[in-house]
């Protein structure tokens, strides 16, 4: 027995509740292509969790001197370094860094 078209449509529905269930989860629109080689492009929407302590290799949103940026988070010589996933951008070795959140998911609209 084949499903009706209405049943097929229901199979394709998605609920964002599972991604936004915690009060510390937020969304932001990507403003540049610094993470394009990681599959995160300008105008994508990312879901991130605030207050989560990052580990090396996580993609984070960080506040560097009042500017938010999304980069790979690494610790080198006991200091954080932010690496882009695009060769047109430089690594950032900030004097001060505030990690806003850790990226959990990416949403893209075609």
Image: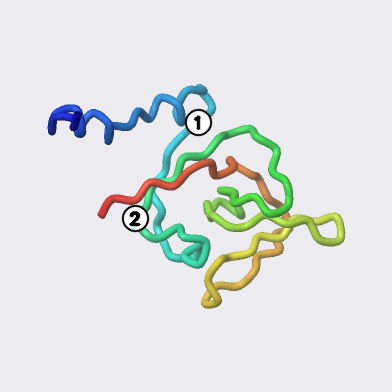
Examine the image and state in which quarter residue 102 appears: top right
Residue under the point 50% across and 67% down: 37
Picture quarter with the N terminus? top left
Disc 2 secondary structure class:
loop
Rendering coords of residue 99 (x, y %): 64, 44
Residue at x 85% of width, y 55% of height:
78
* Mark 2 touches mark 1? (CB < 8 Å): no
Q: Residue at x 47, y 23 (%)?
A: 21
Say left or right for 42 vs 4: right
Q: Which residue is mark 2?
A: 43
Q: Is residue 45 left or right of residue 81?
A: left
* Front position in the image: 93 or 25: 25
User: Residue at the front extreme?
Assistant: 1
Q: Residue furthest bottom?
A: 88
Nearest to the observer: residue 68 or residue 26: 26
Q: CA distance from mark 2 to mark 1?
A: 19 Å
Q: What secondary structure is marked by label 1?
A: strand
In the image, residue 28 sits, relative to residue 22, either above or below, namely: below
Query: On the picture, is 25 further left or further right than 31?
Result: right
Whether residue 20 sits left or right of residue 83 in the image: it is left
Local packing at callout 2 (Cα closer than 10 Å; few below 14, some 14-19, many 20+) is some
The residue labelled by disc 1 is: 25
| Placement of 60 over or under 32, stated as above or below | above
Residue plotted at (73% across, 46% down): 55
Between disc 2 and disc 1, whose residue precedes? Answer: 1
| Quadrant housing residue 24 | top right
């Amino acid at each position: 027995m084949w499903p009706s078209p209405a049943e097929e449509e229901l199979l394709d529905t998605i609920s964002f509740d599972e991604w936004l269930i915690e009060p510390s989860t937020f969304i932001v629109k990507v403003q540049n292509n610094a993470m394009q080689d990681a599959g995160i492009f300008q105008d994508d929407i990312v879901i991130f969790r605030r207050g989560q302590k990052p580990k090396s290799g996580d993609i984070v949103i960080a506040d560097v001197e009042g500017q938010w940026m999304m980069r790979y988070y690494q610790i080198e010589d006991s200091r954080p370094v932010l690496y882009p996933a695009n060769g047109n951008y430089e690594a950032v070795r900030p004097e001060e860094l505030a990690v806003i959140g850790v990226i959990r998911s990416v949403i893209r609209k075609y």
